[in-house]
Amino acid sequence: MAKIIFKLKSVSYDEADDVKKLLTENKIDFYESPAGNYEVSLHALWVNDEAQYIQAKQLIDEYQLKRSQRIRLETQQKIDKGEFETLFQRLLNRPVQFITYLAIILFILYISIMPFLEIGQV
């Protein structure tokens, strides 16, 4: 019976490619189920063999641990060098984009709340 070894929903393309490459290099037979047109189906990687399932889970767990450590280290290095852009720096670097997004948010809130405010006035 097939078992899920890795769900691909909300996974970056590079991570998905790395996991597929890792499984292929270790000669683990897997297949990928697509999410479908409306993303109703489960987009994931599957294996049929129980022994390969255990091996694949171990390999993927090790890969994800190394990946998370590498990304944390890269982020910390950017912070130490002053290259990491904070939210406030983004606002200062892109004021027009910030004002546009803020206006859109306020407009949506106004449209959403206005009917309820009119009920109280009637």
Image (tube, grey):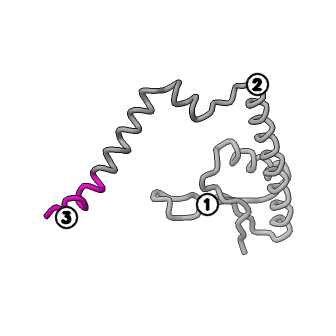
Question: Is 121 part of what is drawn in magenta?
Answer: yes
* Mark 3: amino acid: Ile
Left or right relative to 108: residue 42: right
* Mark 2: amino acid: Lys
Residue bearing the label numbered 2: 81
Left or right relative to 120: residue 89: right
In the image, what residue occupies the spot 72% across and 69% down? Answer: 3
In the image, what residue occupies the spot 42% across and 27% down? Answer: 96
In the image, what residue occupies the spot 79% across and 31% down? Answer: 77
Q: In the image, residue 69 lies at what x, y percent?
A: 82, 44
Find the magenta span and give its range: 111-122
Secondary structure, mark 2, is: helix
Residue bearing the label numbered 3: 119
Secondary structure, mark 1, is: strand
Residue bearing the label numbered 1: 33
Report, in whole angstroms, how far the alpha carbon at label 1 lies from the one at label 2: 42 Å
